[in-house]
Image (cartoon, rainbow, N blue to C red):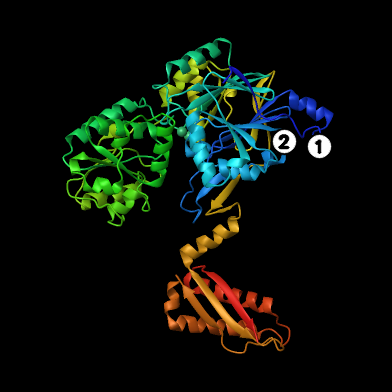
């Protein structure tokens, strides 16, 4: 790849669609600033997505997913709403992905569909990122919607009037990058996810050089700012895993995040040194490991890896099972093993189990009950509060974020990748490192940060929000569907069925009520009274006046009123009326 490459698409349609381009005054104003618009990942952790806009050039940095909290019943994923970019898709020069984690890459197939570009969208990333992107796009049959372009560290890509250079950062996945963004209004350093302790020297050198020329704005990872402790190194974790494995007499079963390829590599190397074979249980782990080996990031001999069947036949002290399920997910390989429901694998007396991860906030209970089940099955379990050195975060602690501020010495700073309190802590920390509070901008989803000749400040807003992915449908689930699911989950459902005479509008027989998940309905008397109430409410209408829709509404209202009055519950009520 050449040192400078002309990236992105030519400005094809901008001249041909004058109706879409802004007026002249507007145009001048637009060219006089660089807008940074977070479309996700600020004030929250997940679905990272940042739009750069300068003149008629747009560049998207990261398109991540967020995993839903439990109250979003049945929702699989949340992705950023990119309708603003879709409206101007002819100005989109490229999507740039900093690393292969789901909260940065996961929404790519959905986003490409949402953008609906007439041309394949150029997607830039390192070799490993593109390997992971390709697998994901193939699975979603979306590969043709983009044009994958590999980028090396140190290469500058020209994306219209914006130039971007990748530099290497330390993180929990190989090939993670930060970005040096050169605009007409100064240099911006975007750390993306990083930890300072394991920054490659070449990355530090590059940042040092950039800082010499003055950096206008620093966009920094904030997610671990609450932690004062320095981030543990992967080498320390690797040693802990090695020592536990060396001391184990039986099988070793280890789980970690499928995307934590640094950890997966540590496990592989330890197994190799100790003469054990590794079998992988879990599709996402298997896929990521395959990509990392193919792209040369994990180097182990082929015969180190064996199938699950083969592992079952080997002597226990020659086996490492690497499985998904670090968050205790019941459907994961480890989750199923823990309750004896895995198709092939059983936990045995004498197994050593290592949870090399820490629970994501909110998952503590699920992880704890999985650990209980593993102990119950007779295994010895090592997990992070007991053996802290089993996990290292991929993110900078408070002190490391300060180190980054000292290295870059930016005029302005913006906390990214964190919840609101973390962003406020970032502003406090910045003050300690010589960046005044009014030069720290707290970003909001959909609100622009305008960078001009005069500095940076918060600007206007664009359309933004979340899109919910439910199974194979994207965006179709809205708050109405969610409200229904919540009502179903908490209070159950009642179906009233009735038959109505078309001519007279009268019921031809007593309505019937069917209930599921609504306990009082077990009580026959309760149902009888409910039916009586419904009939009474219908008698109020004049013959011939009642029509299907009104009867349905009236039955629903009277039943809901009765149920609430008696039980303080609000089950979902569905009237079903047949005309006879
Ligand atoms: Zn990450
Ligand atoms: Zn991240």
495 or 432, nearer to the observer: 495
The residue sitting at 49% across, 29% down in the picture is 127
Query: From the viewer's perspective, is residue 8 above or below residue 359?
Result: above
Cα distance in 3D space between marks 2 and 1: 10 Å
Q: Residue 106 in the image: x percent, y percent? A: 51, 41
Q: Residue 452 in the image: x percent, y percent? A: 69, 21
Disc 2 marks which residue? Answer: 90
Who comes first in sequence, dot 2 or dot 1?
A: 1
| Crowd tier of the residue under label 2, counting other residues whose Cα lies within 10 Å: few below 14, some 14–19, many 20 or above | many
SS class, disc 2: helix
Residue 146 in view of the camera = yes
Q: Residue 199 in the image: x percent, y percent? A: 42, 21
| Crowd tier of the residue under label 1, counting other residues whose Cα lies within 10 Å: few below 14, some 14–19, many 20 or above | few
Disc 1 marks which residue? Answer: 17
Residue 360 in view of the camera = no
Marks 2,1: beta carbons within 8 A:
yes
Left or right: where 118 falls relative to 333: right
Mark 2 close to ligand 2, CB under 8 Å: no
Q: Which mark is residue 83?
A: none
The residue sitting at 54% across, 13% down in the picture is 211
Query: From the viewer's perspective, is residue 180 above or below residue 536?
Result: above
131 or 42, nearer to the observer: 131
SS class, disc 1: loop
Residue most toward the top?
212
Left or right: where 523 falls relative to 505: left
281 or 388, nearer to the observer: 281
Query: Which part of the image, by quadrant, shows the C terminus?
Result: bottom right
Quadrant for residue 535, please give it.
Answer: bottom right
Q: Residue 55 in the image: x percent, y percent? A: 73, 27
Quadrant for residue 495, please give it.
Answer: bottom right
């Amino acid at each position: 790849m050449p040192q400078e490459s002309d990236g992105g698409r030519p400005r094809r349609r901008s001249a041909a669609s004058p109706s879409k381009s802004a007026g002249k005054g507007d145009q001048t104003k637009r060219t006089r600033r660089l807008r940074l618009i977070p479309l996700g990942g600020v004030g929250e952790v997940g679905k990272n997505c940042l739009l750069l806009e300068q003149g008629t050039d747009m560049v998207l940095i990261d398109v991540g997913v967020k995993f839903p909290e439990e109250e979003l019943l049945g929702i699989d994923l949340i992705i950023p709403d990119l309708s603003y970019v879709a409206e101007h898709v002819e100005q989109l020069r490229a999507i740039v992905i900093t690393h292969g984690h789901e909260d940065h890459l996961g929404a790519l197939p959905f986003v490409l569909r949402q953008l609906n570009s007439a041309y394949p969208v150029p997607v830039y990333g390192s070799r490993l990122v593109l390997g992971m992107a390709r697998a994901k796009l193939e699975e979603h049959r979306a590969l043709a919607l983009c044009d994958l372009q590999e980028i090396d560290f140190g290469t500058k890509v020209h994306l219209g009037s914006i130039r971007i250079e990748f530099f290497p950062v330390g993180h929990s996945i190989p090939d993670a990058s930060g970005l040096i963004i050169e605009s007409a209004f100064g240099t911006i350093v975007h750390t993306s996810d990083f930890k300072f302790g394991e920054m490659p020297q070449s990355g530090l050198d590059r940042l040092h050089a950039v800082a010499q020329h003055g950096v206008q704005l620093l966009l920094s990872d904030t997610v671990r700012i609450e932690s004062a402790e320095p981030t543990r190194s992967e080498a320390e974790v690797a040693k802990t895993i090695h020592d536990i494995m060396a001391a184990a007499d039986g099988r070793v079963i280890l789980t970690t995040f499928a995307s934590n390829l640094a950890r997966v590599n540590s496990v592989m190397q330890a197994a190799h040194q100790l003469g054990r074979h590794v079998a992988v249980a879990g599709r996402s782990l298997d896929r990521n490991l395959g990509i990392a080996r193919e792209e040369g990031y994990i180097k182990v001999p082929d015969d180190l890896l064996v199938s699950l069947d083969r592992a079952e036949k080997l002597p226990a002290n020659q086996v490492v099972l690497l499985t998904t399920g670090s968050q205790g997910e019941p459907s994961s390989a480890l989750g199923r093993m823990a309750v004896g429901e895995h198709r092939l694998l059983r936990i045995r007396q004498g197994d050593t189990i290592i949870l090399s991860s820490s629970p994501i906030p909110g998952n503590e209970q699920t992880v704890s009950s999985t650990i209980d089940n593993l102990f119950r099955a007779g295994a010895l379990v090592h997990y992070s509060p007991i053996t802290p050195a089993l996990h290292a975060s991929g993110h900078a602690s408070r002190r490391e974020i300060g180190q980054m501020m000292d290295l870059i010495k930016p005029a302005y700073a913006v906390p990214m990748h964190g919840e609101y309190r973390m962003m406020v802590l970032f502003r406090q920390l910045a003050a300690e490192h010589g960046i005044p509070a009014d030069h720290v901008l707290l970003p909001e989803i959909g609100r622009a940060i305008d960078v001009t000749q005069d500095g940076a400040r918060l600007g206007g807003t664009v359309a933004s929000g979340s899109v919910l992915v439910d199974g194979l449908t994207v965006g179709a689930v809205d708050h109405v569907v969610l409200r229904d699911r919540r009502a179903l989950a908490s209070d159950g459902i009642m179906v009233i069925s009735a038959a109505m005479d078309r001519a007279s509008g009268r019921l031809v027989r007593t309505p019937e009520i069917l209930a599921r998940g609504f306990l009082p309905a077990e009580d026959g008397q309760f149902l009888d009274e409910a039916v009586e109430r419904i009939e009474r409410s219908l008698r109020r209408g004049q013959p011939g006046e009642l029509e299907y829709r009104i009867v349905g509404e009236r039955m629903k209202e009277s039943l809901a009123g009765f149920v609430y009055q008696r039980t303080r519950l609000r089950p979902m009520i569905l009237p079903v009326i047949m005309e006879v």
